[in-house]
Structures are given as C-alpha cells and as structure tokens.
Amino acid sequence: MNVVVWNENRHEKSNPAVSEIYPEGIHGVIADFLNEENVSVTTATLDEEQHGLTDEVLAETDVLVWWGHKAHEEVTEEVAEKVKQRVLDGMGLVVLHSAHFSKVFKKLMGTSCDLKWREADEKERLWVVDPTHPITEGIGEYIELEKEEMYGEHFDIPAPDELIFLSWFEGGEVFRSGATFKRGRGKIFYFRPGHETYPTYYNKEVQKVIKNGVNWVKNTSTPAPVYGNAQPLETINN
C-alpha cells in the first residue's frame, strides 16, 4: 500500500509551541507510526511544487492522509480538483481534524462543513458508537484526551454513511468525530482530534484509529464501472 501523508506544515514553522511538540512536523509523526504497518509511506507539504501532489504521485497513491488548518485557501483549485477526482476514481482519503474545512473535503461533501469551536484545554471523550466497525478494532468503549480543542454541533456535513465516534467535551458540547463516506469508487474517513498545540498524534489509541482508518479506506477490488451506450447482453426479440 502506498500512503501519502499531506500537511500544510505552516504552524510548525511559525509557532514555537507547535514546533516543540512536532519538531518533524505533524506529517512526520503520522508517517512514523504508519511506517509500523509495513506500508510505503511518504509525505507532502503545501510549499512543495504542486503541493507535493503531482500527477505521478497521485497516480501511485492508494491512501492520502490530509491535515490542514490555517492555509486552506493556498491550496490551488487545480490540485484540489485532482485530489477529488482521484478519490472518485478509488483513492482512499483520511481527513484529520481541521481539514474538515479543506477544499478537498468540502468539494467531496458538497456542504460548508462548518462547526462550532473553542480552545480552552478541555477534556475530550470520544465514545465508540459502532464497536463492530473495523476502524474501532483494538479500541475500548472510548478514547479520553486530557486536553483538546472543542468542536461542537451542528457539523454541516451530509449524513455520514457510518458514524464511528461521538465526542463529548468538558464544556458540554458533543460532536460527530468519526464518520465515513463513499464518493464514486473512493472511501473517506473523517477523524476529529488533532489540534496542533496538543500532542494528540502521540496517543497510541489515536494512532491505532488512524492506522485502522488507512487500512479501511484502501480500495482493494472495486471494479471500474462502464458508462454510456451499452450493447445488450442477451438477444432482444422485437
């Protein structure tokens, strides 16, 4: 499996608190723990040519993991459309935290993907609401994070194909924090936790969910449909 971890890599360059937590970038930490799965993992960032997502890279990518926050608008329409098309053609997509507002996710959802938010060092408890799903394998009833950014409902997304996690926050809000979607031949997993000023991606349970999500969105055997005018399979008696 070929996995590309994409990160805008801007907070790490401008905020010392973030660079202290993620000296190799958020993408570096995610790539490191995905490498434990015996898959081929590379990274790409916003400031690379074509954001590191050339036609050649995308053509070879089975699963794309996407993290973005402060620079969504700097992603070109051309690259966003190419990523969207690759998902429709069968590439898996894992969307993390504030990438809910990325051009790619909004294009695939067709909605604003807006929500409530608050930074107040709150406890987050991610409840597993589908314990039979492969993405929750190896996870208990919930994942508890000591400090995270709050995301609250209403989350303006289409009704998910499957709801996997539901978060509760110390301030009282709840949020659909793990959801899956199918678009064309591609599968998408959105997973909420991962604010840049917290060490969330070092949490072993969070890592396990992302590993499971990468394995789940990978397209292994979906046939490419044939469209347009079709010859009959049987003799038509007129």
Image: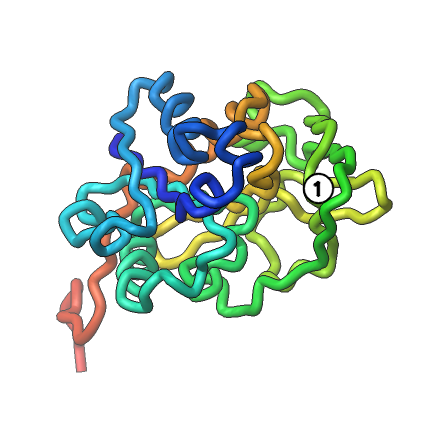
Viewer can see residue 214: no
| In-front residue for pair 180/235 | 180
Specify few, some or many for label 1: CA neighbours under 10 Å numbering under 14, 14-19, or 20 or more: some
Callout 1 secondary element? strand
Query: In the picture provided, is 159 more to the left or to the right than 96?
Result: right
Residue 129: give x, y in percent of width and height: 69, 36
What amino acid type is highlighted by mark number 1? Leu
| Displayed quadrant of residue 164 | top right
Q: Residue at x 34, y 43 (%)?
A: 64
Residue 49's place in the image compared with 14, above or below, is below
The residue wearing badge 1 is 166
Q: Nearer the viewer, residue 151 or 15?
A: 15
- Name the image quarter holding residue 83: bottom left
Q: Nearer the viewer, residue 210 or 193?
A: 193
Name the quadrant of the N terminus.
Answer: top left
Q: Kindly identify the residue that appears in the image at 39 percent across and 41 percent down.
A: 65
User: Residue at image x 42%, y 34%?
Assistant: 25
Q: Which image quarter: residue 29? A: top left
